[in-house]
Structures are given as C-alpha cells and as structure tokens.
Image: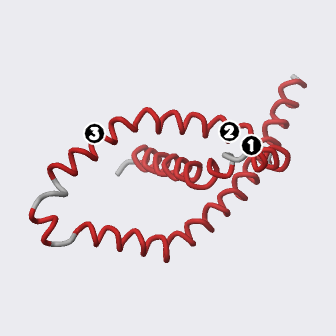
Amino acid sequence: MSLFAKVKCFLTCLIVYYITYLYNYKCPTLSTPLQEGIEHIIHPLSNQHSVLCEYLHSGVEFVEPYHAKVHAFLDDNVHNTQFFIDNKIEDKISDAKDKFTTYVYPYVHELYKLTDVVEVHVYDHLSGVYDQVQKTLKKD
C-alpha cells in the first residue's frame, strides 16, 4: 500500500471519528441555551463547534428522506424474510445494541472526553504557531 493511500485512509478515519464525536458528544451539549452559553465562555472552539453542528444537522436533515426510503426497503424485503424471522435477527440486533450501550459506550464516552481535552491543546498549540508565523511575516 502506498504512503498516499495510508495517509488518505488515516485522514478519512480521523474525519469520520470527528464527525461521530461532534454528533454524539459535542452537538447534544450545545442544544440547550444555558449549556451553550457556558461553553461559549469556557471553550475556545465553541463558535466553530456551533457552526459545525449546524452543518452536521443540515446534512442529517438532507439524508433523512433517503434513510427513510432505505429503511422502508429493508422492512419490506429483508426484515420480513423467513431467514430473518427464523433466526430472530431482530432480537440479536437488539441484544448487540444493549451490550454496546452497557459495555462499550462508557469507554467511547471517555474517549470523547479525552478528544475534547486534546482538541483544546491542539488549538492552543496551533494558535501559538500561527501567531509566531504572523510575527515572522510582519518582520519581513
């Protein structure tokens, strides 16, 4: 595998992870006005989070009709098949969701908290680098 493909895969995974971080962790905390006001004061990236959450929610609203069509297709053509009913796949999916919520999600939530801290540190570091570059460019 070439280096470009590895970098592309890494960046894609990073973007997907950040989208899930925003959708599952950051955007729900910004939904209440009080929490949004507190985040505005404390978190340096609150404006960017608000804008990204708006874009994310508009994307979700755009995808919803297609999601409904796919879900209707699955209900008609997959969930009603004899194989699906005989093997009780719906129950297995429900059990998997419950186990994910019980065992995995607490670790994912901790990872989201860590991502929040790392995000602030990266922002502080990059803004310092940006300021140094601006000072260097102004000297020339």
Give the amino acid at mark 3: Lys
Q: Which residue is mark 1?
A: 46
Alpha carbon distance from label 3 to label 2: 29 Å
**Secondary element type, mark 1:** helix
Q: Is residue 107 left or right of residue 65?
A: right
Residue 68 locus on image (x, y percent): 32, 41
| Disc marking residue 84 | none
Q: Callout 1 environment at 10 Å: few (<14), some (14 to 19), or many (20+)?
A: some
Q: Residue at x 15, y 67 (%)?
A: 85
Residue 114 locus on image (x, y percent): 67, 63
Seen as rendered, the residue at the extreme left is 82
Residue 78 locus on image (x, y percent): 17, 54
Residue 91 placement: quadrant: bottom left
Q: Is residue 50 left or right of residue 56?
A: right
Q: Callout 3 environment at 10 Å: few (<14), some (14 to 19), or many (20+)?
A: few
| Disc marking residue 50 | 2
Q: Which residue is mark 3?
A: 69
Q: Nearer the viewer, residue 91 or 105?
A: 91
Alpha carbon distance from label 1 to label 3: 35 Å
Disc tally is 3
Seen as rendered, the residue at the extreme right is 139
Give the amino acid at mark 2: Ser
107, above or below 53, in the image: below
Give the amino acid at mark 1: Ser
**Secondary element type, mark 2:** helix
